[in-house]
Amino acid sequence: GWVDVSSRTYTTCAIDSTLSIQCWGENTSDLVTTAPASGTFKSLSVGEDGIACAIGTDGLAQCWGEAGDGNWNPLVDGLEPDHALDSLSCGLHFCCGIGTDSSLACWGNTAGNWSDNGQVSNAPASGNYSQVSSGVYTACALGTDGSISCWGSSEFGGSSPPGGSYVSMGAGYKAGCAMDADGYVDCWGYDEHFNAATTPTDAYDSLVVNHAMACVLDTDGHAACWGGDDHQQVTDTPV
């Protein structure tokens, strides 16, 4: 059996029943061959462009791989937080995590190149959070009070979430979506991906947001997806 799994584009990593990490697929930036060979882990996240991080059973993050343009090699730079994490999420050249004390920490590329839109430097310095989601050029965190904070690229409004109270959310390319306590979904940002006209209007039970699309499940287990459909990821949704 498997404990956790995460995929991005051409590579997948998972934690098996022995709490070890296995990666397979394209070996982008040595993401497969540099996966931790020892240690025990409880969760992981594969980011864009050949990076991944996992939380050990001791709560500490360990990262591997390297950003494709050579700007971040966490194995060398040692950028991971030195405190215990409950969860983490990796995006393009950066990762963010929620500490066991509900604090937020982001680390990764701050080189000021094309991929740096403040995903690390503009992350909130204080506050209490229950969830974080790292997209490509933006990241968002869900406060323990239900409010959403986003930062990174302001293009297309991806860092401008709606007000209100939510129970889950996710960040994508330059956009995001969130679900409230009644199961209704709001989206913001890049309209080509999360078009307001195609966002479901019914109530659902759970939400997941990916690079350019989002999906929801209802209480009967039926799925609905919307957003980018360049590989039929929307039109081929099972009904």
Image (cartoon, rainbow, N blue to C red):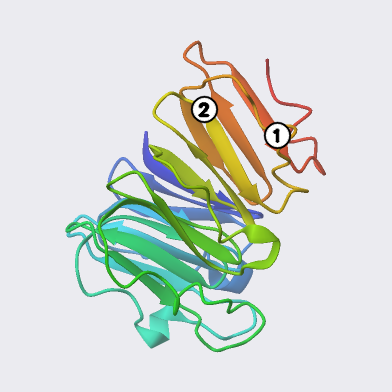
Q: Tag 1: Cα neighbours inside 10 Å, few (<14), some, or many (≥20)?
A: many
Q: Dot 2: what SS?
A: loop
**Residue nearest the observer in this picture, 124 or 17:** 124
Q: Mark 2 sits on what residue?
A: 184
Q: Residue at x 46, y 23 (%)?
A: 205
Q: Is residue 172 left or right of residue 79?
A: right
Image coordinates of residue 14 in percent, x first then y, are 43, 48
**Residue nearest the observer in this picture, 25 or 212:** 212
Q: Residue at x 62, y 67 (%)?
A: 154
Q: Quadrant of residue 81?
A: bottom left
In the rendered image, which quarter contains the C terminus?
top right
Amino acid residing under circle 1:
Trp
Q: Mark 1 sits on what residue?
A: 226
In the rendered image, which quarter contains the N terminus?
top left
Q: Is residue 229 visible from the viewing direction of this image?
A: yes
| Whether label 1 touches label 2, CB < 8 Å | no
Q: Tag 2: Cα neighbours inside 10 Å, few (<14), some, or many (≥20)?
A: some
Q: Is residue 35 visible from the viewing direction of this image?
A: no
Image coordinates of residue 97 in percent, x first then y, are 34, 61
Image coordinates of residue 85 in percent, x first then y, are 25, 60
Q: Residue at x 70, y 34 (%)?
A: 226
Outermost front residue: 163
For the image, the number of numbered tags is 2
Image coordinates of residue 82 in percent, x first then y, are 22, 75
Q: Is residue 159 left or right of residue 148?
A: right
Outermost top residue: 220
Amino acid residing under circle 2:
Tyr
Q: Residue at x 52, y 20 (%)?
A: 203
Q: Dot 1: what SS?
A: strand
Q: Is residue 121 above or below residue 124?
A: below
Q: Quadrant of residue 2?
A: top left
